[in-house]
Image (cartoon, coloured by chain):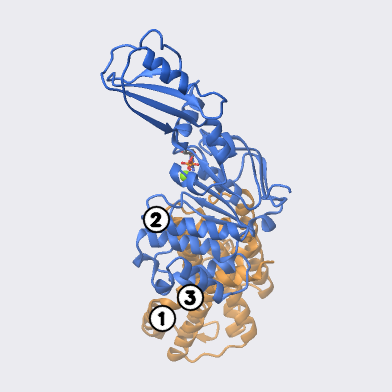
Amino acid sequence: MPPIVEITALRKAYASGFEALKGVDLSIEEGEILALLGPNGAGKTTLISTVCGITTATSGTVRVAGHDTVEDFRAARSMIGLVPQEINLEPFERVKNTVRFSRGLFGKSPNPALIEKILRQLSLWDKRDSQIRELSGGMKRRVLIAKALSHEPRVLFLDEPTAGVDVELRRDMWEIVADLKRDGVTIILTTHYIEEAEAIADRIGVIAAGEILLVEDKDKLMSRMGKKELEVQLSEPISDIPASLVSDALRLKADGTALIYTYDTKSERTGITQLLSDVAAAGLVLRDVVTRQSSLEDIFVDLVSEGEAP
Amino acid sequence: MNWTAVKSIYVFEMARFFRTIAQSFISPVLSTSLYFVVFGAAIGSRIQEVEGVTYAAFIVPGLIMLSVITQSISNASFGIYFPKFIGTIFELLSAPVNFLEIVMGYVGAAATKALFIGVIILATAFLFVDLQIQHPFAMVGFLVLTCISFSLMGFIIGIWAGNFEQLQLVPLLIVTPLVFLGGSFYSISMLPPVWQIISHFNPVVYLISGFRWSFFGAADVSIGVSLFAIAAFTALCLSVIWWIFKTGWRIRQ
Ligand SMILES: Nc1ncnc2c1ncn2[C@@H]1O[C@H](COP(=O)(O)OP(=O)(O)O)[C@@H](O)[C@H]1O
Ligand SMILES: [Mg+2]
């Protein structure tokens, strides 16, 4: 199946001359949830804005279900829903009215039942006649989500949907995302909450300084890059690793109370048995043994710092 | 054409207008009544007749034009500046709509509001002066065309403006003088010859002249020229807007 969103050699230089996207290539499969991780200023919002038509690309192309987003913008855009990062809403408008407006703007005929369903799902139904300015920040974000869902998009962009929102909304969000995925909607979300990507994404893309550093299946990524650490806690602190144990994989904890052994989970032999018998042979007494799996966060920090290295 | 989108924008904008309908009407009705008292009754009683009609009646078309033009510009410029200012314009830019649909929605609503106000002022005028309209269809036609063309101009101003001061500046610095010097309160033929020539460069002269013709059957310039001038002005505004959306000037980064 051809990708639902296909971004090719996309560059964006702002009027200031600053190049926010430096040749992005990205294919997004229909029905998947892709999390775009990246530090502030990486170009996540710029990428989304360019796909959605809010900014114009300097060069490169974007296709949505085969429709060029410039040449054939009507077909492309009518498939896309966008929940922007900034809360942009008219303060004096009423909730239901603004959601209804979004649906009309996308050329869809009125569907009160659908609007009601969306508002209920987002716990906004009681607030349907409230003015936006009367709502809390989290509620306003829900309104933005309702507006984007009102026109039944096939591809949904969520730009930092859970930045600065309460736990409850984050849970609701994840539920909605799961529901949409069940309906076959493709979801691209940007975040710098790694747990979020870890919790809901199928694939993870890492972007930094306007370049995509990697896009990979989440589980594969974690097992490929996931290393485990074994911490061998000693009953007596030592000042140096005994000569018989010295290896690249082993280091001493700063306070000398433990040896830390790093190993690869996917290799045939982890070397743990050997290590433990060597430790005993060296006359060290074990107090406890702990293992740790490196998280997506560690992977991400590693990648981005590598990306920034000259 | 995405007619649903046009209608949505139009209805949304009109709803804003109806929410503040009392405010929208009070100010133009009040100021027009004051004009009638000052120019029509106080000064007008000392002026015999202009082009065969009483002075109070003579100023009615000009007063309507004055209000309709300022209302069209302020409605349309604010209508598009506001989403730009608060950021909701992202939705227009990411929606499957083209520039014509956006313009029809916003300019259509702004022009409708101005038309409402024009009609209200005409009704107010009937309270003060004895008035007969010789060419009612032409009158309505001129009114509608004026609302549309100046709403288009207002739309351009709204996109151009970078802040609220600029939004007020153009109407104040350009439009008000043009309208006042456009023969709202006098016939161009009353001016010294040099000023008569200068007046022919003022597009508003053609509008007011044509509009006054539809009331009294007499005009400063011929009706055909008036129609041509307003059509040319509308076409100019439309092409500027087409260019704005094509290049993304001041709206797309
Ligand atoms: N309108 C603009 N003009 C100039 N530079 C911009 C503009 N918008 C964003 N940038 C710059 O582009 C880079 C990427 O920004 P953005 O896409 O918002 O990043 P992210 O969403 O990943 O935090 C940043 O360095 C930002 O300062
Ligand atoms: Mg961002």
Callout 3 amino acid: Ala
User: Mark 2 touching mark 1, by CB under 8 A?
Assistant: no
The image position of residue A121, as x and y in percent, is 48, 67
Per the model, the C-alpha gap separating discs 3 and 1 is 21 Å
The image position of residue A170, as x and y in percent, is 42, 55
Q: Earlier in the sequence, mark 2 or mark 1?
A: 1
Extreme top residue here?
A243
Asked whether residue A294 is in view, the answer is yes
Element type at mark 2:
helix
Per the model, the C-alpha gap separating discs 3 and 2 is 26 Å
Identify the residue at horizontal 64%, vertical 84% (top origin).
B137
Q: Chain under label 3?
A: B
Q: Quadrant of residue B221?
A: bottom right
Callout 2 amino acid: Glu
Q: Is A177 located above or below residue B104 in the figure?
A: above
What colour is chain A?
A: blue
Q: Earlier in the sequence, mark 3 or mark 1?
A: 3
Residue B189 vs residue B36: left or right? Answer: right
Q: Which residue is mark 2?
A: B165
Badge 3 and badge 1 in a common chain: yes
Identify the residue at horizontal 45%, vertical 42% (top origin).
A194
Q: Which numbered dot is residue B29?
A: 1
The image position of residue B97, as x and y in percent, is 63, 61
Identify the residue at horizontal 39%, vertical 66% (top origin).
A132
Q: Nearer the viewer, residue A108 or A223?
A: A223
Q: Chain under label 1?
A: B
Q: Is B246 located above or below residue B155 in the figure?
A: above
Within-10-Å neighbours for mark 2: few <14, some 14–19, many 20+: few
Q: Earlier in the sequence, mark 3 or mark 2?
A: 3
Q: Which residue is mark 3?
A: B15
